[in-house]
Image (cartoon, rainbow, N blue to C red):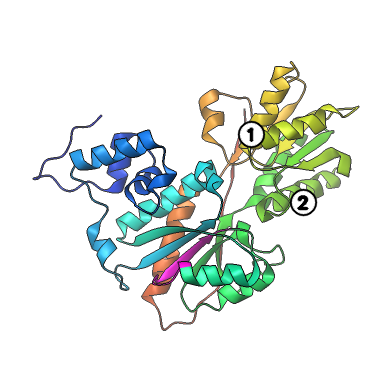
Amino acid sequence: MSQATNSSERPISIKDFAARSRLSVATVSRALRPETAHLVQEETRRLVQELAAKWNYSPNPQARSLRNPRHPMVTIILQDVLEVFQSDYYSRVLGGVLDAAETRQVETRIVLVGGTGPEFTATFRRRTAGSNAVLYLGKPLQTSELTEIARDPRPIIFYKNALPRDISADTSTLRVIGTDDAKGATLIAEHLLACGHRRFFLAGGPAAMRDAIDRENTLVARLRQEGIEIGPEDRTHVMFSVRGGREAWEEFARQERPATAVVCGSDEIAFGFHQAAQVVGRDREFTITGYDEHHLIKQLHVPITSVEHDLAAMGRASVELLLEALARPDVPPEPVWRLFPPRLIVR
């Protein structure tokens, strides 16, 4: 581990801190914030706090004390479930957000917002009070909730997976950022078709999640072009989790004529599916694909082909979009629809 800096050296940034401690930027930030410290494991939290004292690190006091257009406060909205802090996806996105915020001297706070309808919108207003702008990574929005939130005069960046499915690049008047899931699903379909597969099983993510359904619909449409139909018995929807993958395996195992290609809605699902098949010695009977290039897949060398998006870059870009909007308060907001391209990782 690197030696501590002395008083004559420049103060280290949160990015330096994360690199030296071999932790993520998001973990360091959460451990040092009173409102989120409880979300970090006690041993890790104690380590971060000890290193902060040793290295004389404080989380950007200038940005914390000044809430004006030069040093704005951005509220980050997440779903009101603690599982988001165990998610590799959110960890990488938030890492990019916090990295950009530290660099650009932007104060951030992370809040969890739940509920539906008027309860949700009232909580949204209360929890974002005092902030200059909002990053919305929260629960999937109902149309009425989105309409109400969009009336807020402050700049808001919406992550695509939270929007109703009838909102598209052609119809949106919002600032939207996300991943190009249609392109990602197409890459998977083309790869599996090129490998000669004709029988498919889809272990998709939750039906309420826009990104999960966008991937599934794109894949089904592409396979239909090749004369391959995916019926209700050939697909299931589970949570984006290892447990969800095990549940999907149970449905797959009951098939009389199992598929040769299993397309999973996330790498967590794929890992759980592969693990369950491995227990009964059937993990070599099919090709399996995931999505989002989870660190588990890379570290454990599991033979799962995946799709990778630069989620940290997406997080950084969302901060830059907000800063651009804040720099021009008198200019009417212009719609933004920016999707980050995918890359197929074949294993």
- The residue that mark 2 highlights is 217
Whole-percent x, y for residue 308 in the image? 56, 41
Q: Which portion, as a residue range, is magenta? A: 127-138
Q: Is residue 98 left or right of residue 253?
A: left
Number of dots carrying numbers: 2
| Label 1 environment density (alpha carbons within 10 Å; few <14, some 14–19, many ≥20) | many
Three-letter code, disc 1: Val
Q: Secondary structure at mark 1?
A: helix
Name the residue: 71% across, 62% down: 165
Looking at the rendered structure, which numbered label has been put on residue 242? 1
The quadrant of the picture occupied by the C terminus is top right
Nearer to the camera, 52 or 332: 52
Whole-percent x, y for residue 133 in the image? 43, 69
Whole-percent x, y for residue 87 in the image? 54, 43
Q: Is residue 21 left or right of residue 208?
A: left
Q: Nearer the viewer, mark 1 or mark 2?
A: 1
Name the residue: 43% across, 63% down: 75
Q: Is residue 296 left or right of residue 60?
A: right
Residue 291's place in the image compared with 160, above or below, is above
Residue 245 visible in the picture: yes
Residue 172 visible in the picture: no
Q: Is residue 182 magenta?
A: no
The quadrant of the picture occupied by the N terminus is top left
Name the residue: 61% across, 40% down: 307
Three-letter code, disc 2: Asn
Residue 122 found in image quarter:
bottom right
Measure the C-alpha gap from mark 1 to mark 2. Answer: 23 Å
